[in-house]
Image (tube, rainbow, N blue to C red):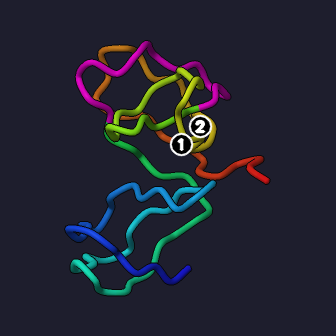
């Protein structure tokens, strides 16, 4: 999908929220520039060191307004499902993005 970045730009591989879905930036997109977001498939998404909890395979994955990956749905954007288990201490989680969304 084509995406025009309204703010400070995004880097290749960044998770980008677009209304009720997410995408992964295919290439760097400059502020105000247009680029491609990948909207299906499994991607390894970086978690912060303090992501809330771990993930079991098949768990729903969300992103907070602060951009933190979490398993908490309240007030957070749905990302997809955990493709594999990921311990709380793990720095990433493989996610099938937008799976079942819509």
Percent of width and height locating residue 30: 22, 80
Span highlighted in magenta in the image: 47-60
SS class of the residue under badge 1?
Answer: strand
- Residue 11 x %, y %: 24, 67
Work out whether 102 lies above or below 58: below
Q: Quarter of the image holding residue 39? A: bottom right
Residue at 40%, 33% (x, y): give it: 69
* Residue that carries the numbered disc 1 in the rendered image: 95
- Disc 2 designates what residue? 83
Residue 5 lies, with reference to residue 76, above or below; the image says below
Q: Is residue 48 magenta?
A: yes
Disc 1, disc 2: CB below 8 Å? yes
* Dot 1 crowding, Cα within 10 Å, few <14, some 14–19, many 20+: many
- Numbered circle sitting on residue 18: none
Mark 2 surroundings: few (<14), some (14-19) or many (≥20) residues within 10 A: many
Q: In this rendered view, identify the residue nearer to me: 68 or 60.
A: 68
State which tag comes first along the sequence, 1 or 2. Answer: 2
Residue pictured at 28% horizontal, 78% vertical: 29
């Amino acid at each position: 999908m084509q995406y025009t970045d309204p703010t400070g730009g995004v880097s290749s591989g960044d998770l980008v929220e677009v209304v009720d879905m997410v995408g992964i930036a295919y290439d760097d997109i400059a502020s105000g520039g247009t680029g491609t977001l990948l909207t299906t498939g499994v991607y390894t998404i970086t978690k912060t060191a303090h992501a809330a909890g771990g993930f079991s395979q098949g768990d729903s994955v969300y992103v907070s307004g602060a951009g933190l990956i979490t398993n908490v749905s309240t007030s957070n954007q749905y990302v997809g499902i955990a493709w594999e288990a990921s311990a709380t201490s793990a720095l990433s989680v493989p996610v099938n993005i937008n799976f079942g969304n819509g």
